[in-house]
Amino acid sequence: MQRLIECVPNFSEGNDMEIINRITDEIKTVEGVKVIDVDPGKATNRTVVTVVGTPEEVCEAAFRAVKKSSELIDMRHHKGEHPRFGATDVCPLIPVSGISMEETAEYARTLAKRISEELNIPVYCYENAAFKPERRNLANCRSGEYEALGERLSSSDWCPDFGPKKLDDWTAKTGATAVGARNFLVAYNVNLNTTSTRRANAIAFDVRERGRVKRDGDPVTGKTVKDETGNPVYIPGTLKSVKAIGWFIEEFGIAQISMNLTDIGIVSIHQAFDEVDRKARERGVRITGSEIVGVVPLKVMLDAGKHYLRMQQRSTGIPDREIIKIAVKSLGLDELYPFDPDKKIIEYILEKEESSSKKELINMTLTDFCYETASESPAPGGGSISAYMGALGAALASMDANLSSHKRGWDNRWEEFSNWAEKGKSFYEELLKMVDEDTNAFNKIMEAFGLPKKTDDEKTIRKQAIQDATKYAIEVPFKTMQLCYQCMEVCKAMVETGNPNSITDAGVGALAARSGVKGAFLNVKINAKDLEDKTFVEKVLTDGKEIERKAELLETEILEMVNQGIEG
């Protein structure tokens, strides 16, 4: 899984598009970073930018944006409705995929330190990056806003975590920046079959974490209950980390529950949907659909789709796109307008941009892939074909598991087969990546041979590059061997316990996977003869022979069971 984070810097300028564009243009100078959204607000005089990429790329882009904003924005003249205390007011990092919150927090702290040292800007670390519990809350860090900054910078309790601790001409211009790490926030609206804002608000108060004001007697007209300090007492709602309000949408003529899910690790979209549905029905109202405002990580949609598949006792080991369809229909995300995964899911947005910039084998049609293989180009070759054979073998085993999960009379076994389908899916997804990776490995060797070799230094660099590329060209097909052999376990399980009508499909899957093992091993062996690291070569050839031997034995065992099944 690719390591991705999101960064949502907020800049204290929402009116001058020239300044905004210069900041976002600076972000775009970092290769691999994608600017997903730019949202300027005139009344708030603030622009929210959404950036996605690998952690290193995003942190570099964030630093450049902070630097540019410090040059272009003068906080001494800033006015706006939103709380603020710096040119780059906040800069949160959010884990999207393949990275933990703890790792993201470390990236945030490293970024904060760099901003302070290289740009001389005061920086506070908040949320999961906070060094002190009282600084987790952004409002605490930003208390008093820009106008109180001079006093707080020099305070022993509220001086910044990094950077200058006094207000001078430079810090008065830049203000301070809060750098944090937080979970993904989703703006999510649920549509109701009513035009009543009052009913929508009642449901919103039922579910939101803050809840509703407690009253004596009548819940609407009764006297507000207050605590000993004179503040209203609230009855908490049922959903943690959720803010919600009811409103009427003129454009669509319906009422909605508008929610911010501030920590989808605590409350997911599907959990919020189901709870709003439960509370709405208690009040005689029905949900008709919902909408996601902005973009979401792939995991959000997959978790939702799998949740509803499990409720139906259906296999979750189907392709991701099919799981997303279930999520869209279950949540009614296409009620108001079409839901396009390629424009709403972060990983797909990045994937589409990356695919448009390079030629990928796995995105070709079957016919084009065949023609490309048959062309005069030496790649794709046997390594890519071996990986694809293995992927097809795993796909056949997954198909058998999915059919078994949905077989009439086997309802009590749906989860058993769903687990096997998930396992097969993990293998074919990895093997599909190896189709292109094997070709990439070959291309690295060609690039290494193309390096200059006029001087002794150039010859040394070229020789090392060739050796490094050769070693990688061994590691890739060796990994293909391992994956192909492992997926044969799923083939065997489906022959033994799966739908008997699909026994030959699982058998063909085993044949394809075994061929993938043997084909990939041929690539390992031919590349191994050119590697000077003989210790590595000896180990990989020994391990490869053992995998090939076990794959042949397992193939024989599976085919004997298949033939017995056919014969009856």
Image (tube, rainbow, N blue to C red):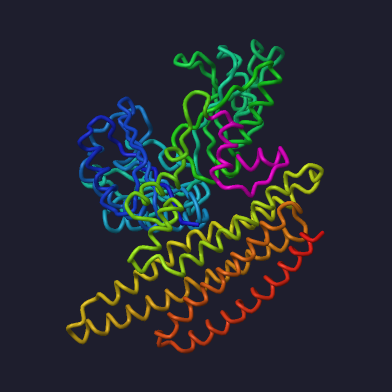
Can you name the residue that lies furthest to the front here? 567
Q: Is residue 222 above or below residue 495?
A: above
In the image, which residues are magenta? Answer: 305-333
Can you name the residue that lies furthest to the left here? 454
Q: Main secondary structure of the magenta part?
A: helix
Residue 525 rendering spot, x and y as whole percentages: 48, 81
Compare residues 264 and 42 and report the one nearer the observer.
Answer: 264
What residue is shown at x 46% (from left), y 62% (from top)?
435
Q: Is residue 361 left or right of residue 258?
A: left
Can you name the residue that lies furthest to the top here? 221
Q: Is residue 230 left or right of residue 474?
A: right
Residue 327 rendering spot, x and y as whole percentages: 58, 36
What residue is shown at x 50% (from left), y 77% (from top)?
522
Residue 310 magenta-highlighted: yes
Q: How many marks?
A: 0
Residue 262 magenta-highlighted: no
Compare residues 354 and 194 and report the one nearer the observer.
Answer: 354
Residue 534 rendering spot, x and y as whole percentages: 46, 89
Q: Is residue 299 above or below residue 262?
A: below
Q: Is residue 220 above or below residue 356?
A: above
